[in-house]
Image (cartoon, rainbow, N blue to C red):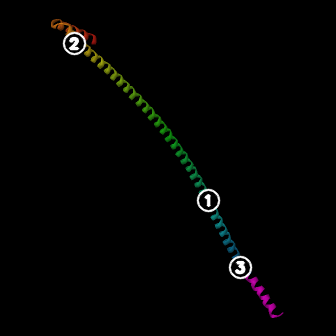
Amino acid sequence: MDATSWASVWAIVALVIFLGLIFYIGAHKTIGKALDDRSSKIAAELDAAKKLREEAEALLAEYQRKRKEAEAEAEQIVAAAQREASALAADAKAKTEEYVARRTAMSEQKIKAAETDAVNAVRSAAVDLAVAAAEKLIASKVDGAADAALFAKSVSEVKTRLN
């Protein structure tokens, strides 16, 4: 055998001794344990990430539910405000119509009172004018004593008719 063959043999023998020593010391167990630990650590991290994702999804669902509730509540508030505004508008319209009706009735009463006052004033003026005309007519036709008696009688008649 030549030197190269002997070197190959010694390299193989050294490799076998080295591998035997590694198995004897239990390095393969340590490496396996390290790989198992790393595998379990990665699995734990994946589980934690899965839990975090589930929590995030639950929070998202809760916030979406709360948003929908808030939107529904806002719609209810708007609807209530619209109903209240409609009621206020109807109330204001009714009060305005009532006010106009009252003012119209008061105006009609004032007009009737003014008409009555005007008719009474015209009657009074007509009576005064008739009395004055009768007085002038009687004064021209009757003497002083008969004049006074006739005048007193006419005035008393007018007074009784007016009252």
Q: Earlier in the sequence, mark 3 or mark 1?
A: 3
Residue placed furthest toward the right:
1
Q: Which residue is mark 2?
A: 136
Q: In this rendering, is residue 100 above or below 120?
A: below
Q: In the image, what residue occupies the spot 23% across and 10% down?
A: 137
Q: Amino acid at mark 2?
A: Lys
* Number of marks drawn: 3
Q: Amino acid at mark 3?
A: Ile
Q: Amino acid at mark 1?
A: Arg
Residue placed furthest toward the bottom:
2
How crowded is the residue under tag 2: few (<14 C-alpha within 10 Å), some, or many (20+)? few
**Along the viewing direction, whichever of 106 and 149 lies nearer the viewer:** 149
Q: Which residue is mark 3?
A: 22
From the image, state whether disc 3 or disc 1 is nearer to you. Answer: 1
From the image, state whether disc 1 or disc 2 is nearer to you. Answer: 2
Q: Earlier in the sequence, mark 2 or mark 3?
A: 3
Residue 12 lies within the magenta run: yes
Q: In this rendering, is residue 155 above or below 35?
A: above
Look at the numbered disc 3 and give the secondary structure of its residue: helix
Residue 73 lies within the magenta run: no
The circle on residue 53 is 1
Q: In the image, what residue occupies the spot 62% across and 59% down?
A: 53
**Along the viewing direction, whichever of 73 and 8 lies nearer the viewer:** 73
Q: Which residue range is magenta in the image?
A: 1-18
Q: For residue 24, say whether it is visible.
A: yes
How crowded is the residue under tag 3: few (<14 C-alpha within 10 Å), some, or many (20+)? few
